[in-house]
Structures are given as C-alpha cells and as structure tokens.
Amino acid sequence: MKAPSPIATLPPRLVRLRDGQDYRLRLIDDRDAAMVAEMFATLSTESIRARYGYLIKNMTPERAAELAHTDTSRDTPLGIFGLRWDGTESHLWAMGRLVHAPDNQSAECAFLVHDSQRRLGMASTLLRYLRVLGRRRGVPRLFAQVRRENKAMLNVFIQNGAQLHFSPDSDVVEIDILLQRQKFLFDNPSRAPSIAPMSSPEKKRFSIVGFLFDMVLSAGFFVFFYYALQSHVPSNDPTMIRLWSTLAAACMTGVFWLALQMLKTVFGFQRSNRK
Ligand SMILES: CC(C)(COP(=O)(O)OP(=O)(O)OC[C@H]1O[C@@H](n2cnc3c(N)ncnc32)[C@H](O)[C@@H]1OP(=O)(O)O)[C@@H](O)C(=O)NCCC(=O)NCCS
C-alpha cells in the first residue's frame, strides 16, 4: 500500500509588502469561509473569470466554505490577510492554492489577488511560500496553465524562475516549476536559504594517499621552479640567488597547491553529480 503524502505545515507569519504594510500569511482553514465570501463579493468579474475560467455569480456560504475548506491530502490553500491596528485580521486579500496530484509527484498552483491590492508582491510572496510547502511535502514539481493574454500571471511566473512552454496551436501556456533541481556547479544560488552544495560541511573526506600525492606533486613543482628561476634572479651573489628563487618557487607552489585542490573539488563534484 502507498504511504500517505506528508502534510506540509507553515506557521503563520508577518510579511511586509511593497506598500510598507505588514500582512499575515497563513494557511486558510474552515474558519475563513466568511472572509472568503467577503473577498469574492468585492472582486471584479474579470478577476474571477481569469482565476476560474468562468464567473461565480453567487458566492453562497456553501461555495465559500468549499473554497476555504482544506482537504490536506488534496490541497494546500494559502492566504494573505490585511491586519487592523490591534493585529486582528480585517480582510483576506489574496489566495494561492496547491492542488496535489494523487501520486504526490506534482501539484497545480493558482492565484487570486484582490483588485485593490495588485502589484504589491502578493502573488510572488504566495508563490514563494507555496514552493516551500510543496518542497516540504516532497512534491518534485509545480505546474500551472495560464492563458496567453494573462500577462500579469505570466510575469509573476517569469520573475520567479518558472519555465514557460508556449505552443503555437494553443492559447494556454504551460508553466513548470521544478522544486528538486539537479545540482550544477556554477548555478545561480537559489533564493531559498540553503547551504550551497560545494560548501556543505558534510562529506568532507580526507585521504592520506591523496594528501601525499599532492605533496609529492607540489614538491616536484617546487624543485623544478627552484632551479628554473635561478638564472632569472638579477644577482651574482649565490646566497641571494638561492633566497629569491626559493621564495618565488614557494609562492608559485602555494598557488599550484590551491589550483590543484580546486581542480580536484570540481572533478569530484562533477563525478558525484553524474552518478
Ligand atoms: C496575476 C495576479 C495573481 C498577480 O498578482 P500580484 O500580487 O499583483 O502580482 P505581484 O505583485 O506579485 O507581481 C509580480 C510581478 O508580476 C508582474 N505583473 C503583475 N501584475 C502585472 C500586470 N497587471 N501587468 C504586467 N505585469 C504584471 C510584474 O512584473 C510584477 O513585478 P513588478 O510589480 O515589480 O513590476 C493578479 O493580477 C490576479 O489575481 N489576477 C486575476 C486572477 C488570475 O489571473 N489568476 C491566475 C490564474 S492561474
């Protein structure tokens, strides 16, 4: 029997958006039905159509309860709430939702931001945290389907590193967001705080054979340059010649040692990535 998918949780948190105000970001639950209904009552018909593809004319209490309801095995709805001066929630301003595939191998994401709160970064913030939730649940990939003319939504995805797939015979753009990316050596660091793979403190293996090999190689390098550099020291004093060729060869050997370590790290990293 297949193990049930882990349920991802996210404690409520304050997020400061572009208008300088603090908002509460948290999972939506059954108690939010009234605020969902209130949000829909003041949304433009275009926004509702853009989100659902059709118009929800009457937001009945049942429909609002349905949108606020979380079946944790199936979906993860996240909301951004406006706050009163005393910290209580006044409005639900934005919703982002993950709908999970039964095999937990992907989740569809969708967003709706109130018309009065656009361009504050609400959708981008929701997307960032939906990624966190997806990752915590072990979902490898998020996806979405967005109409070509929905530039706002497409731009949110573009700005947040999603892959867009256009097809000439379709009005719909397929969006892909990979959550468990393959490691590349010179990849841009992701926004999520994580230790870069190469600087990870784990798996630092020390091999005495490797160390001796490096020492022998470096000693050979030093000896070669010690003799090669002697004829380049502008002095007739044998002590000065020995001193300066020793110093110069030592500096060059230090650089050689560093380069050798970097080379080994890169090769080791590429080899482990190929496995
Ligand atoms: C699409 C939508 C969710 C965007 O929400 P938002 O909170 O305004 O988006 P953000 O503030 O995070 O915007 C991030 C970036 O997206 C782009 N963007 C957002 N709205 C845009 C618009 N109307 N036109 C062009 N670009 C836009 C901008 O590049 C913006 O960055 P900037 O403000 O620094 O220039 C919102 O417009 C909405 O709810 N639309 C109706 C519902 C919908 O279409 N849902 C999608 C169904 S999958």
Image (cartoon, rainbow, N blue to C red):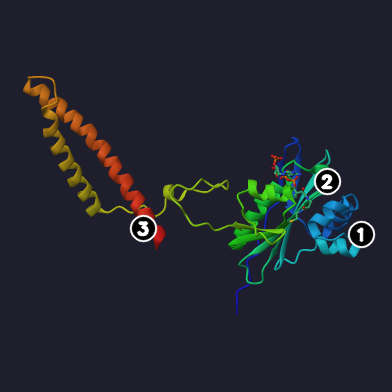
Residue depicted at x 40% and y 63%: 275
Q: Secondary structure at mark 3?
A: helix
242 and 29: which is toward the camera: 242
Q: Give the residue type at disc 1.
A: Lys
* Sequence-first tag of 3 and 1: 1
- Specify the quadrant of the image occupied by residue 142: bottom right
Q: From this viewpoint, is residue 168 visible?
A: yes
Label 2 Cα neighbours within 10 Å, binned few <14 / some 14-19 / many ≥20:
some
Q: Which residue is mark 2?
A: 115
Give the mark nearest the N terminus, 1 or 2.
1
The number of numbered discs placed on residues in the rendered structure image is 3
Mark 3 or 2 closer to N-term? 2
Label 3 CB sits under 8 Å from any ligand 1 atom: no
Q: Nearer the viewer, residue 195 or 234?
A: 234
Residue tagged 3: 271
Residue furthest to the front? 169
Instruction: Tell me where residue 16 appears, x and y as whole percent.
Output: 71, 39
x then y, percent, for residue 23: 76, 43
Q: Are marks 3 and 2 in contact (CB under 8 Å)?
A: no
SS at badge 1 = loop
What amino acid type should be assigned to the residue bearing mark 3?
Arg
* Residue 248 in the figure: left or right of residue 149: left
Q: Is residue 53 left or right of residue 266?
A: right
Q: Nearer the viewer, residue 188 or 168?
A: 168
Q: Is any atom of residue 89 visible in this view?
A: no
Q: Which residue is mark 1?
A: 57
Snapshot quadrant of residue 143: bottom right
Q: Give the answer, above or below, for where 110 lies relative to 196.
A: below
Q: Is residue 197 left or right of residue 31?
A: left
Residue 118 on image: x %, y %: 78, 43
